[in-house]
Image (cartoon, rainbow, N blue to C red):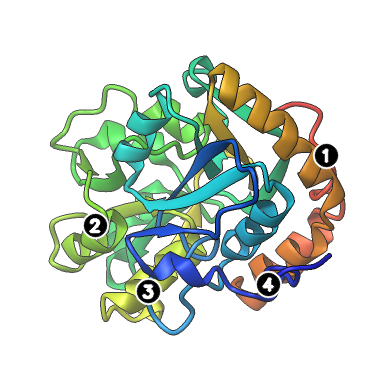
Amino acid sequence: MAGPCRRWSIPLCFIGAMFGVWPLAVRAEDTMIWLLRDLPPLTIFEGPQKGQGALDQLLPVLSERLPQYRHTVMHVNRARGIQMLRAASLTCDPSLLWTPERAKYIVFSAQAFAVASNGVAIRRNQQAAMRPFIVDEHFDLQAFLDAHKARIGATAERSYGPVIDEQLKGVDPHILALHYGNDALGSLLQMQRLGRLEAVLGYWPEIRYHATQQGIAARDLVFYPIKGSAPYQRTHIGCSDTPQGRLAMARIDQVLRDIPQEQLQQSYTSWLDPVTREQYLRDNPGFFQDSPNPE
């Protein structure tokens, strides 16, 4: 494979800007807009590891193998990304959870990337107060919400998986604090540090990364999986469900079938703590095969 993006280890050097464009391919027929969120360890916008996320390293490979498109990167928050995916432009997001609602306007890739599921982070000094909601080292989110005694933070328009999404439906805004900003998780962690939230939802590597960016020591936080949730979730590439988007997805699926996924796995697992990494690799030897259906 020729070209400047031939190695998986080359970071997506254009991601540092708010809006970047890969070199135009010869006879490129359409512009493919890639929507990226700051979602470590999949995509990393700032800091010394900028551009070194697992998906940061996948996108240049997709760009090279889809020369019929002009590839443009836009940094968006989750709410803005969903809005753009509903539009008629050729817009794609490389890190989406499949949901029935999203499937109405997004076409998803067949192949998925497996990640350890979302959970909840609480302050270590709040463990005693949160003990009634911790069962067998899992957090009972439904009991927490039903108690109406504390607040939990979440990113607006984000899916946390079917179990969590269902429990968050219709929750009183005095209990559920939704943040729409570009640095939603970082802001929520700051609110938690100030005592305005008792818990924050997210992926544990993502929470640890943003906590460090906010000057919050990861050791001051404790992470719990959500009671009833599967231990792993599959993220997919998703494009706007338009004729252009469906054609692009057929091409993306073909490229994904030809790309060795082990490099993605290695990039992702390097961000996991040793215990989680060992469990992930032991549980999921087949996670990087084609998924028969989006989950």
Which badge, 2 or 4, is on the more N-terminal residue? 4
Q: CA distance from mark 2 to mark 3?
A: 18 Å
Q: Amino acid at mark 3?
A: Glu
Residue ID for mark 2: 188
Closer to the chain start, of discs 1 and 3, is 3
Taking 97 as reference, is 226 above or below it? below
Rendered image quadrant of residue 280: bottom right
Q: Earlier in the sequence, mark 2 or mark 3?
A: 3
SS type, badge 1: loop
Q: In the image, 285: left or right of 61?
A: right
Residue that carries the numbered disc 1 in the rendered image: 290
The residue singled out by tag 4 in the image is 4
Which mark is nearer the camera, 2 or 1? 1
Q: Nearer the viewer, residue 147 or 141?
A: 141
Tell me where residue 103 appears, x and y as whole percent: 54, 20
What residue is rendered at 26% in x and 47% in y?
A: 152
Tell us which disc is closer to us: 1 or 4. 4
Give the residue displayed 41% in from the left and 64% down from the top: 207
Q: Which residue is mark 3?
A: 46
Q: Is residue 106 visible?
A: yes
Kindly state the secondary structure of the residue where label 2 is placed. helix
Tell me how far mark 4 sits from mark 3, CA to CA: 22 Å
Asked whether residue 228 is in view, the answer is: no
Q: Label 1: few (<14), some or many (≥20) within 10 Å?
A: some
Q: Amino acid at mark 2?
A: Leu
92 or 202: nearer the eye? 92
